[in-house]
Image (spheres, rainbow, N blue to C red):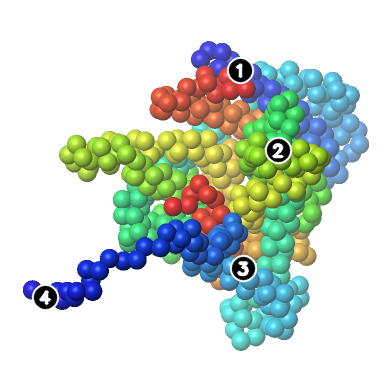
Amino acid sequence: MSQVQLNQSDFEPLQVDHSDAEKIAGESTSYWKDGWRRFRKNKLAIFGVFIIIILGILSFIGGPISGQNYYQNDLMNANQSPSAEHWFGTDNLGRDVFARTWYGAKISLFIGLMAAFIDLVIGVIWGAIAGFFGGKVDEYMMRIADILYGVPYLLVVILLMVILPQGLWTLIIAMTITGWINMARIVRGQVMQLRSEEYVMASRSLGASNTRLMFKHLVPNTLGPILVTLTLTIPNAIFTEAFLSYLGLGVPAPLASWGTMSSDALPALQYYPFQLFFPAFFICLTMLAFNVIGDGMRDALDPKVRK
Amino acid sequence: MAKYLLKRIGYIIVSLFFIITITFFLMQAAPGGPFASERKLPPEIEAQMNEAYGLNDPIHVQYFDYLVRAITLDFGPSFKYVGQEVTDIIARSFPYSLILGAEAILLALSFGVLLGVIAALKHNKFGDYAAMVIAVLGISVPSFIMATILQYIFAIKLQALPVARFESFAHTILPAVALATTPLAFIARLMRSSMLEVLNADYIKTARSKGLSSRVVTYKHGLRNAILPVVSYLGPLVVSILTGSFIIEKIFGIPGLGNEFVVSVTNRDYTVIMGTTVFFSVLLLVSILIVDLIYGLVDPRIKVTDKGAEK
């Protein structure tokens, strides 16, 4: 039982200053500042950003620092375990796995970023036009999207890989031919919600053109969901590339991606599991990093999931 | 209801028409004929084979022939396997894919829901973190890598399960697990967030304050409402299992339809490619329709007919 000490001063009335009610306690924050504050607190997402930055840097300097290149065959030293000379060992043609891993990183990241970027451009324009004009335009545009959406994504990609000549850009085109639909649907939904807002009407009554309304006012206000979708598209594209390469439909021979490296390592898996380990590990790590960044961004930027 | 159903079936037919048309012309545009193999055929024989397979007709005749035959589910003979009809190939290989797919869907649904519910009930405690780590890893590890890891650990190192082929129940375990991993993780995350939302709802508080046991509250009141987003995920789940089967069946040497499709792609066996594509699309469109109808049944707040009349 502890005694509470009370003084006379504890019972004096506090001065109430009514002007305090009007005072703004904190600095005003914008959508992006607020989002960044939330994102920064998410340790997992920050960890993801670091992983991507490190992988990005290594994809450029990884080859040079090991003093090996990704294409040099050396059949006398094939299938070696990791050593001081070959840090990740060598593959069945004696090529240095360390150098190939970072060269593969460059290809895989490039495909992921490029596919996401093209999806972004087509999806945003398509979705913005459909959502902004509504009515018949919307009906037809989204019907086309629905029909394309009805066919499984990987099926379309595989069919296109059959008829187009194999190559890096073929892969990207095949992935983006239906990949943009998801983005278009999200942008359309957002634009439809926003187009009846007062600021749009205000701008319209000031004589702004439709294009200006769409891309100066509406699209910037949907950037949050766009960004989230974009970050989740990248791991999807990297996965698709690896998937196709695993089936033997990926980037052709002199190029190497993580998918082709995994696929090459398969026949000798029982004896040289490390050849599969490195590319497979980095595919998983990259997808993990982009997924946690995407989750972090959604928590930070999507008003619906804020708690 | 009948009107809605008719309308949906109408859309499915239109979609299928486009899919058949597009695949037909894509295959026409593909480089290399079906008989362009390593061994050069004498020109007379090649001409005769083209004649036998109807490849000498003008394109529009071939197209209409194909369209008419596709309606009766007859996709013509395979170019690579002499004497085999595409329909026979599908009928032979589909049962394998069906068993594998059903097992994977069951696995993904039951464990995904379980994991999500555990995570929501133990919100911000160890159980939640453990379940979510499993879910994030499941999303980040592609199915084909998962398959290879499983093969390496359970078949090669531990010798506990068969490494490939499809003969008994033991053979199906590894491919089904590999196929289920990614959708399982998605379902777990979906279930967790929807369960968290539901557990905060007012009617749950009412149920609790009536003095119902927490088991009844969780399973009878909570789970039944929280499972709705998972039901709407069933469509994408079917797609994911379907496309996942391409690679999983190849890795495990299962003679299913996914594997058949991949083989036909590498063989450039055009009729088989077209036939399987159309078959996959029918399967998918119909299962999405069924999922939508189930959704209307499960959630009385949603009337499917309303959705049909939305515009």
Q: Position of residue A192 (x, y in %)?
A: 65, 36
Residue A208 relative to residue B72: left or right: right
Give amino acid for label 2.
Met
Q: Amino acid at mark 4?
A: Gln
Residue A52 badge: 3
- CA gap between label 3 and label 1 equals 47 Å
Q: Residue furthest bottom?
A: A84
In the rendered image, the quadrant that contains the N terminus of chain A is bottom left
Q: Chain of mark 4?
A: A
Q: Are marks 3 and 1 in contact (CB under 8 Å)?
A: no
Mark 2 vs mark 3, CA separation in Å: 42 Å
Q: Residue furthest right?
A: B43
Q: Secondary structure at mark 2?
A: helix
Which amino acid type is shown beneath numbered disc 1? Lys
Determine which of the numbered discs, if any, sits on residue A3 in the image: 4
Q: Where is mark 2, residue-wise?
A: A201
Q: Are marks 3 and 1 on the same chain?
A: no
